[in-house]
Amino acid sequence: MIEVKNVTKIFKTKNGELTAVDHVNLSIQKGEIFGIIGYSGAGKSTLIRLLNGLEKPTSGSVIVNGLEISSIKGKELRLARQKISMIFQHFNLLWSRTVAENIAFPLEIAGVPKEEREKRVHELIELVGLSGRADAYPSQLSGGQKQRVGIARALANNPEVLLCDEATSALDPETTDSILRLLSDINQRLGLTIVLITHEMHVIRKICHRVAVMEAGRVVEQGDVLEVFQNPQAEITKNFVMQVSDSRESKESIEHILKNYPSGKLVKLIFVGNTTERPIISYLIKEFQLDINILHGNISQTVNGSYGTLIVQLDGDSENVEKALEKLKSMNIKTEVITND
Amino acid sequence: MIEALFPNVDWTKMWEATYDTLYMTAISTAVTFVLGIIIGILLFLTSPHQLWANKIVHFLTGSLVNIFRSIPFIILIILLIPFTKFLLGTIRGVNAALPALIIGSAPFYARLVLIALREVDKGVIEAARSMGANTFTIIWKVLIPESKPALISGITVTAVALVGYTAMAGIIGAGGLGNLAFLEGFQRSREDVTLMATILILVIVFVIQWIGDTITAKTDKR
């Protein structure tokens, strides 16, 4: 669906050249939700703008839906953009138009006749859950409602691709979740390919199938979300994963426990997929007569399955502790013995 | 009562002059509005990082605007006498004042238009581009509607200035209240005529300002 081949984008600024995107390769499948995560200045905003030709690459090529976006221009590019919609962090609605008129705008651009336009706008207002607000102006809406208008507007011309430029970054956590649910819902219902950029791992975890991590213009890691969560390679990815697994806080409590309970073994268990759903702890207690002290636990749901960590203290006969660890390994649960170092 | 306070006022002449002032102000404001928006949009679109970014066109247009904006109006009228004569065949009458009024105020309004357009959210322009809008659509459906309150308050300021300009235009034989106040009032030492003309000009200015403010408030949905 989307092929980014060896793309580099260099901006000429007063202080010399700035490489915003550095030899990036991406391949995004039809119907998937692909996330690009990175801190601000990593080049992700530029990268997403290369996908609808708002920016042109310095070198390399961008192909979306069979069209080489990086080389077409004029009318051809404008027509292509009608099928590659975009939503924005600050919504970018026209304050001078009502909700219905904002949603009608892309239809006016596409030359859709008035009656059909009204019908389509009505459908879209229903789809994004804004019934009754058609005649409100953006200034009368909350942030979440504004983004819903943005989404309705983006869907107006039945696009193939939806680009989300930090679409939830200006929203509170609860509203973020409701917008993410809406995006995930339209992805499933309409089979729309979604590319989103964000700096929040939470967003990636919630709705993305695959993720690319960007740092200083380069993609340093990419893969299935669950895989990246389990086994982050790059330092920056580990930091992002920590955002959602909260192990920074648990680190302090582990140090505390290690000092106060020197007996037994401190073990971090990592569950993936359906192993999260089995009653493992009670099994270990019964089978190996161990005392198990649960120190920290966490389960994250991703689109491809759940991912959980549990930090426990295993106390009892040291032979039995070893046996228990062996057993866990055979059950496909990753274990990590935490020591005081 | 009014007759006693303004004994020298010839009311037929006064109303005629009021009509002339209104006529000159209305026509020149209307033409200035259109011309100023066109020049202002050209200035905006040719400025750096905009859709038609072009240093040469931007510089030339900007310079022309600045030149006509800095010539004092009274001098501009005199400089434009040959042009007016060529255009209309005469330099007398209300129509003869129009070229000078328009050339004097359109560049001024163009600057106000430029300021108004710069205030339009860049993100909204980007959004329109991402939807596949062409430049004409962006001008017509984004730039103008999104800057409407500023465009209207700008033309209000310009119209008020134009009322003043019409008075000065009297010296090339255009009619109007300013002309009347100067010839019938000042030169013949009939203070009541000057006072009445001034009162009428004030009323016109107040009404223009009120209309402008009302429309501005109505169009602003922010």
Image (cartoon, rainbow, N blue to C red):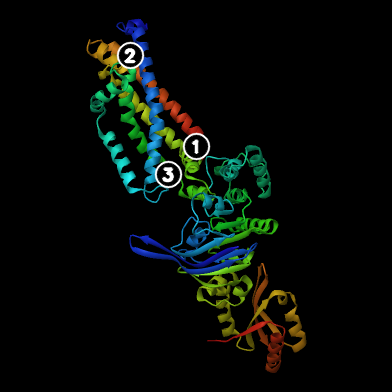
Task: Give the side of residue B170 with respect to residue A134, left or right.
Answer: left
Classed neighbour count for the residue bearing mark 3: other residues with Cα under 10 Å, few (<14), some (14–19), many (≥20): few
Q: Nearer the viewer, mark 2 or mark 1?
A: 1
Q: Quadrant of the N terminus of chain A?
A: bottom right
What mark, if any, has residue B119 been given in the picture?
3
The answer for which chain carries disc 1 is B
What mark, if any, has residue A289 been given in the picture?
none
| Front residue (pair A69, A137) | A69
Identify which amino acid the numbered label 3 is placed on. Glu
What mark, if any, has residue B196 been given in the picture?
2
Query: Are the numbered discs 1 and 3 placed on the same chain, yes or no?
Result: yes
Quick one: which residue is furthest to the right in this view?
A286
Residue drawn where x is 46% and y is 36% of the image? B149
Q: Nearer the viewer, mark 3 or mark 2?
A: 3
Identify which amino acid the numbered label 2 is placed on. Met
State the CA–CA distance, disc 1 to disc 3: 14 Å
